[in-house]
Image (cartoon, rainbow, N blue to C red):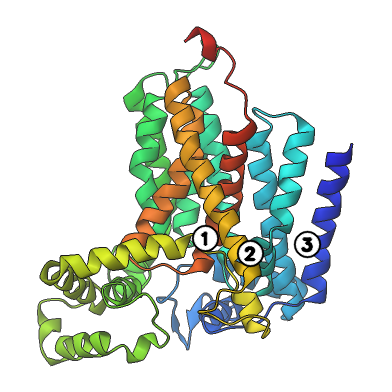
């Protein structure tokens, strides 16, 4: 009972924070709000009068829906993010309940709801809490898919990953290892009629991802003239990640300005899309100085473990680049959570318990993608509920049923 009371109280605290601290618009917020407001007025997802290109559609669409239903007010956006945060943690709790008693799952989930980096991120008009919900849905459905081998759960996992890719494509590289995990998981019980063969299970998963992404790719082909899913700043981000990990003005980045001018001066004849050319320039920079790039990658790995404090900075309660005692304490917690998730991999291998690999796959797979591109502490919010659930499983989860017989 005490665990359930703590969980309900924590959810109420999240709602109170959303009401008392309406969401703040920061640097990236207009790129989501503009298309959302355009959709809410019946003009579709457009930015500055043009079809949406700089962002993927799902979070602007979510903003558009709440604007149309509840109005264009900051508290509306904070309540949307708070709802996503609570739902993400509850999905992670559903995974914990596969192995833990209700009281332990409730207490762990209450802690996740109130964990400052996750809670305060709901107070910004940014998509991290929304992404956390999508990745938590992927976490739960992939766990069930690996656990059961059932075609329905495999298809649900693929659809969840596809939806997360429509918010941010950094999750899509998880498709291949997730398909392998599904294929190598235990076959379904005799009463489950489909998906018994490994190749079939992997195929169902990949096709489900593809079907979710296909409409947006077709839209981009019809509207923008190219059959692709990614937004139009991926190359820009990748190029920036070969230069520095502390970029404050992306449009004035000298390497970007120079590459864009090269493209205008003639490179566009062989590379019609600027973003594609920026990827090429970034790869050339990596080839020319691989050691420097690897150093930036290692630094990004560390930055990804830092707890998010962007809301605290936005309200003037913290400054980037400083490390007060409270922030060092949160950093130690984050590092411990990552260490626990790494230990879960060891337990999964020792016990030959494939579902235990799902959380580490999402956590470290996402981290790897950000490490090779660009990382900000706020990106860690996206895997926050999964990270905390994985660490809890590493600490207190008993072996899977039947593990001793395997």
Binning the other alpha carbons within 10 Å of mark 3 as few (below 14), some (14 to 19) or many (20 upward) gives: many
How many numbered badges does the structure rendering display? 3
Cα–Cα gap, marks 1 and 3: 19 Å
Q: Nearer the viewer, residue 145 or 300?
A: 300
Query: Mark 2 falls on what kind of element?
Result: helix
Query: Residue tagged by mark 3?
Result: 14
Query: Residue tagged by mark 1?
Result: 380
Query: Mark 1 falls on what kind of element?
Result: helix
Q: Compare marks 1 and 2 and give the one earlier in the sequence.
A: 2
- From the viewer's perspective, is 388 left or right of 152? right
Q: Compare marks 1 and 3 and give the one earlier in the sequence.
A: 3
Query: Mark 3 falls on what kind of element?
Result: helix
Residue lying at the far top of the rendered structure: 405
Q: Compare marks 2 and 3 and give the one earlier in the sequence.
A: 3
Residue at 12% of width from left, 83% of height from top? 267
Q: Are marks 1 and 2 in contact (CB under 8 Å)?
A: yes
Query: Residue tagged by mark 2?
Result: 117
Residue 109: where, in percent of width, then height?
Answer: 72, 46
Q: Is residue 277 above or below residue 128?
A: below
Cα–Cα gap, marks 2 and 3: 12 Å
Residue 209 visible: yes
Q: Are marks 2 and 3 in contact (CB under 8 Å)?
A: no
């Amino acid at each position: 009972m005490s665990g359930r009371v703590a969980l309900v109280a924590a959810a109420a605290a999240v709602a109170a924070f959303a009401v008392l601290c309406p969401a703040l618009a920061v640097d990236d917020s207009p790129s989501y709000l503009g298309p959302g407001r355009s959709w809410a007025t019946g003009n579709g997802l457009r930015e500055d009068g043009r079809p949406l290109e700089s962002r993927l559609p799902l979070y602007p669409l979510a903003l558009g829906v709440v604007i149309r239903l509840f109005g264009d007010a900051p508290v509306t956006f904070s309540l949307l993010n708070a709802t996503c945060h609570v739902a993400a943690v509850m999905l992670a709790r559903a995974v914990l309940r596969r192995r833990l008693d209700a009281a332990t799952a409730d207490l762990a989930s209450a802690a996740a709801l109130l964990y400052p980096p996750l809670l305060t991120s709901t107070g910004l008009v940014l998509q991290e809490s929304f992404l956390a919900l999508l990745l938590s849905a992927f976490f739960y459905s992939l766990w069930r898919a690996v656990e059961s081998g059932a075609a329905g759960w495999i298809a649900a996992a693929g659809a969840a990953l596809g939806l997360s890719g429509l918010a941010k494509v950094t999750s899509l590289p998880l498709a291949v290892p997730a398909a392998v995990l599904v294929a190598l998981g235990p076959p379904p019980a005799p009463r489950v009629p489909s998906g018994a063969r490994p190749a079939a299970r992997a195929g169902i998963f990949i096709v489900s991802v593809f079907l979710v992404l296909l409409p947006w790719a077709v839209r981009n082909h019809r509207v923008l003239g190219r059959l692709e899913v990614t937004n139009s700043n991926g190359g820009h981000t990748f190029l920036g990640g070969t230069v520095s990990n502390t970029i404050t003005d992306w449009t004035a980045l000298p390497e970007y300005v120079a590459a864009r001018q090269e493209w205008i001066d003639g490179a566009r004849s062989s590379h019609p899309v600027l973003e594609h050319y920026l990827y090429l320039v970034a790869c050339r920079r990596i080839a020319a100085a691989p050691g420097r790039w690897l150093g930036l990658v290692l630094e990004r790995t560390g930055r990804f473990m830092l707890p998010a404090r962007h809301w605290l900075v936005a309200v003037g309660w913290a400054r980037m680049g400083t490390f007060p005692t409270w922030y060092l304490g949160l950093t130690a917690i984050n590092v411990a959570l990552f260490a626990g998730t790494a230990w879960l991999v060891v337990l999964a291998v020792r016990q030959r318990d494939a579902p235990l690999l799902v959380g580490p796959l999402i956590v470290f797979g996402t981290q790897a993608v950000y490490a090779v591109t660009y990382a900000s502490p706020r990106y860690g919010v996206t895997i926050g509920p999964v990270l905390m659930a994985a660490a809890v499983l590493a600490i207190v989860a008993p072996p899977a049923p039947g593990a001793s017989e395997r």
